[in-house]
Amino acid sequence: MKKNTTLIFAILCLAFSYVKAQTATGDGEISARVLDETKKAFPYATVSLLNSGDSSIVKGTLTAEDGGFQFKGLKAGSYTVSIYVVGYKKVLKGPYLISADKKVYGLGDVQLAIDSRELKGVEIVKQRPLIERQIDKTVINVENSAIAAGNSALEILERAPGVTVDREGNVSLKGKQGVMIMLDGKPTYLSSEQLANLLRSTEGNAIQSIELITNPSAKYDAAGNSGIINIKLKKNQNYGTNGSLSAGAGYGRYHKANGGLTMNHREKKLNVFGNFNYGKNKRYSGTDIVRVNNTIADKTYFDQVNTTVRDRNNSNYKAGADYFIDERNTVGFVFNGYNSNGRNESDVLTLIGDRPGKTDSSVVAQNPGDYKYTGMTYNLNYKVTIDTSGQEFSVDVDYSRYTGSEDNHFNNRYFNAAGQPLKSAYLFRNASPSETNIRAAKADYTYPIGKAMKFEAGLKSSLVKTDNNFIFENFEGNAWMDDPKRSNQFLYDENINAAYANLNRKFKATTVQLGLRAEQTNSKGNSITDNKIVKRHYLNLFPSVFVNHELAKNHEMGFSYSRRIDRPDYESLNPFISYLDLYSFNFGNPFLKPQYTNSFELSYGYKKTLNVTLGYSHTTDVITDVLLTDTATKTIFISDQNLATQDSYNLNISCPVQVTKWWSSSNNLTTYYNNFKTPDLLGAPYESGRIAFNLNTTQTITLAPTASVEWSGYYQSRNVYGTLLIAPQYGVDLGLSKSFMDKKLSLKLSANDVFKLQRSSITSTLPSQDYVVSERWESRVFRFTCTYRFGSNAIKAARQRTGGSEAERNRVKSGR
């Protein structure tokens, strides 16, 4: 591994040295970086390029996150640069003469100074649009959205363009599962169920924005075949002491409540921050399963009705500090965590007969369950800005620990067609305590090579240890007896070592980024009860290519390619059975292999508003949920399997429209085709595929400077995933927001699924599997949220530090 990594870096460095030697200046160009009064990057400052002769505006722009701006393709002439932000003194730089003798001007760092005459009563507000399109990602700025108020992170994701979430909490992006979910730039390496529970425990009031990255660069972990969704939590860095207090209530079939507190204290050398959010949610769901158990001898018909009430309490919290040693060195510490606990009350009625509509016997079950999940992550980080050109080095060290437990009881009573008891009740229960420990460390280095080129490199190592226990007991002779044949302990260890390098080069109208990531994986799964050990050791290379070209003033095209991997989550590898009820269960597959995806994407943008992307990906050994029936035991079960391949084609069109000054519209259409193939499924070749589409639209109407109405709708057409045929889903949400007291007090009223349209229906694409799974849930919920902001609002450009530790946390259970 060390020799391979050294060779990779040697080749890349030689290539980068050659590219640097070939660098040549192009046409006229003026660039600089804007800093605030403390010499920190100032994003979203207004910059104008003026004609020096008559001061007429030639071009205009806003500074980027790093404070940088650039005017390219300038004709010969004399220009002046104007930089202006409310509350700061206006800056004029120039004139600069573009001629054959000198075409490029790099102004370096331009520092702003506070204008004391304008400070009184001034509040800097940089409000972004709800949906913002950038070259490499789509950003949803949910912080000020009325619909986001009172909802969880999972519910907000359901409304994101191109994103779908099924009732188990599995997230798909542009029709593909296998999304890497990140919090503040750190992958949450949890199982799909555990990740869904974590997102349900994260209150929407704590979220600043959501980033959708469909084709990530080599800097990111290679996991996630359909891309990355990064959820950025709020962090205020205004000077002084400030914060916000929020409280909300909701009602669907049951009452809900949420509240939160955010605090921040900023001085010249120190920034301390923290937040706490709490939610209480009691909700209803129902599942109907109608199926036929076919055998050569006979048929058995099952009609099962399951109603469940889940009562959940969850809290999530975050605290940390940044200490600015000097203007170039910063050290920080962050810890965040969550607690989730609750109780499920499930009633199941199963009618059994030898023909449709006839009941020969029935099973009545009450299946209560209790669960509790906790998680804590600690991060220590250091960053140094080596020089004013942007050369940086950062180190992150993380430790995460997750614990969980579920205790489920299954009380089954049997009756004949007349409703008389057939035999004694069958009672069993199971407990599933789990523990996951994750240690990770990484280092990143950035080196600007002149004004037009940037080199990035980094190393990372992670170590994950999980312990999943499953204890099965039967009630016999007035006592609970252990069932060793159905109990199991599963241990899983995983070590991943990674190295990456990126080279970004800006030409006259073209930007090119080349990257290569190497990941070496060592894993060991140990099913103690079955004495099954599965070890794997493998090294993979993950190249990436990004090209963006400006065709004309308002037109640009891009191309990207990347190779990615998805490793099975820890729970999917555990081979033992977990019961949902007497006739429904799931189990893991310790022999699951990782899946690999090659993704290609071609994009077109007009005025950075209309965006069209055309994508194709090919996945081998695709990991897919397979829902099957067991004719021998007359049960239905779900398990993960490696199908041979998945070919995915998608066309995405996003178009934000400013209809009038008071009406803005954001629209997204994704059309896709997923084709699955495998040479052997149930003893025969299998292939499935279907064209489908997803439509999202959000309309924002400004009634007054302090009031707005927002409504959004989505439609997901009928689609196929693996062996499942999923019926259409759709819904409409509505929100109203109003602020008072100079925008310190905000009131938001929202309604999810106003017309109560959301439901789900699943059938099988396999002819031998005859079932219909229908789900309904408490989707229509009305919420009212109140937020009060207090404390100092001294003028300061907000700077969101996303940490940088990419600790493995995306495959662990975290509460329902």
Image: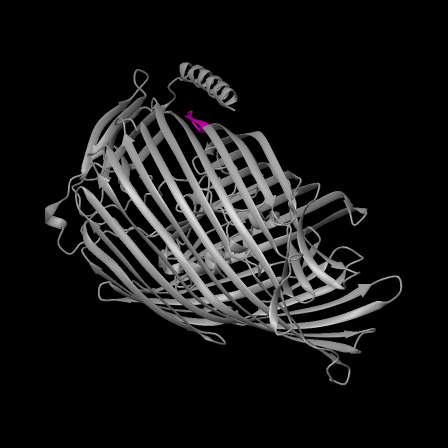
Of residues 131 and 278, the one drawn nearer to the viewer in this rendering: 278
Of residues 533 and 579, the one drawn nearer to the viewer in this rendering: 533
Residue at image location 41% in from the left, 46% down from the top: 400
Q: Is residue 227 above or below residue 346?
A: above
In percent of width and height, residue 770 lies at 77, 62
In which quarter of the view is residue 561 placed?
A: top right
In percent of width and height, residue 590 lies at 64, 45
Give the tally of numbered discs.
Answer: 0
Most extreme residue toward the right is 297
Q: Left or right of 322: which side holds 9?
A: right
Of residues 695 and 449, the one drawn nearer to the viewer in this rendering: 449
Most extreme residue toward the left is 117
Of residues 329 and 550, the one drawn nearer to the viewer in this rendering: 329
In percent of width and height, residue 152 lies at 44, 61
* Residue 704 in view (yes/no): yes
Q: Is residue 262 above or below residue 526?
A: below
Dominant SS type (magenta): strand
Colour logic: one colour
Magenta region includes residue 453:
no
* Residue 617 in view (yes/no): no
Residue at image location 24% in from the left, 53% down from the top: 264
Q: Is residue 128 above or below residue 269?
A: below
Q: Which residues are magenta?
A: 501-511
In which quarter of the view is residue 504 placed?
A: top left
In which quarter of the view is residue 390 placed?
A: top left
Q: Left or right of 520: which side holds 451?
A: left
